[in-house]
Image (tube, helix red, strand yellow):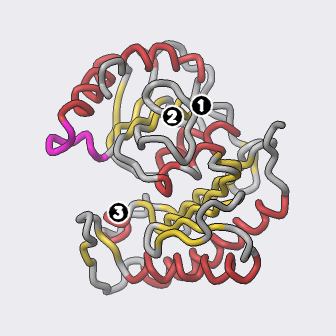
Amino acid sequence: MALVCPDMFVELAQRLVLASGKVITAHFRKPFSVEEKQDLSPVTIADRESEAAIRRILEAERPQDGIVGEEFGVSGEGKEFQWVIDPIDGTRAFASGKPLFGTLIALLQNGVPILGVIDQPILNETWVGAVGQPTRLNGQICKTRTSCGGLSHAIANLGPQAFPFGNAVALDAYRRLSKAVKTTSVGGDCYTYGLVASGHIDVAIEHDLNLYDFAALVPIVEGAGGRMTDWNGNPLNDRSDGHVLALGNPSLLPDMVELLEGAL
């Protein structure tokens, strides 16, 4: 049976990012400390407070669902519906005062993303994607650039790991892609995938992502006419290994899979 995301979940997700956005904007470009977690990634008071605000609403309104959050872990493991939260995807950008971070909210049904939200509260931009519905930016339907021809005409965005200190195998794949496309940019975190959904970027590629980094992106890009897979062209779900590929034009997938062959 085909998956469909009920409107009640879309409405709830929009209220979740509204609550988190109030927390984040209150801290943006204000004095705060940046701590380092065990995995060496940064975290701030805004990360923790915004996830806590989201969890309070979910625990009150959807106690039967599971939650996977970057800051406070997993509860309700194995539930049919799981909410996946990244309160600030792009903490480094947030801590630097750059409005290129975003809050990510996803809803998984049996491990498959059926709803995703990217919220950039400083720029007041919110992308909402839900299975069975077109993706919308601030309420207006948005589309990927499916008119992009081959890779030689594509605008590509490489993950922040594209810098020299990254994984050598992945770096080689990024270099190959850089030579194959028209132009590239680097970084941008989840905001990049909103730009894919809105037709400004044709290819986005990253590796070593966690579920909370990519789950929300899938319904957004695909609801706008694009495609999201792993580097082998397989659909993304809660068992994916974190090698993520987003394409505005799905017809580019065979060429991308061939280009990335041997990179895993």
**Nearest to viewer (mark 3 / mark 1):** 1
x 35%, y 63%: residue: 93
Earlier in the chain: of badge 2 and badge 1, it is 1
Residue 19 tag number: none
**C-alpha separation, residue under disc 2 versus residue under disc 1:** 6 Å
Q: Amino acid at mark 1?
A: Arg
How packed mark 3 is, by other alpha carbons closer than 10 Å (few <14, some 14-19, many 20 or more), is some
Q: Is residue 40 left or right of residue 245?
A: left
**C-alpha separation, residue under disc 3 versus residue under disc 2:** 21 Å
Residue 93 tag number: 3
Q: Which residue is mark 2?
A: 246
Where residue 170 sits: x, y (%)? Answer: 27, 33
Earlier in the chain: of badge 3 and badge 1, it is 3
- Report the label total: 3
Answer yes or no: do the residues labelled 2 and 1 have beta carbons within 8 Å?
Answer: yes
Q: Amino acid at mark 2?
A: Ala
Q: Which residue is mark 1?
A: 227
Q: Secondary structure at mark 1?
A: strand
x 54%, y 65%: residue: 68
x 45%, y 38%: residue: 244
Where residue 27 sits: x, y (%)? Answer: 43, 82
Instruction: State which quadrant residue 32 falls in.
Output: bottom left
Instruction: State which quadrant residue 119 falls in.
Output: bottom right
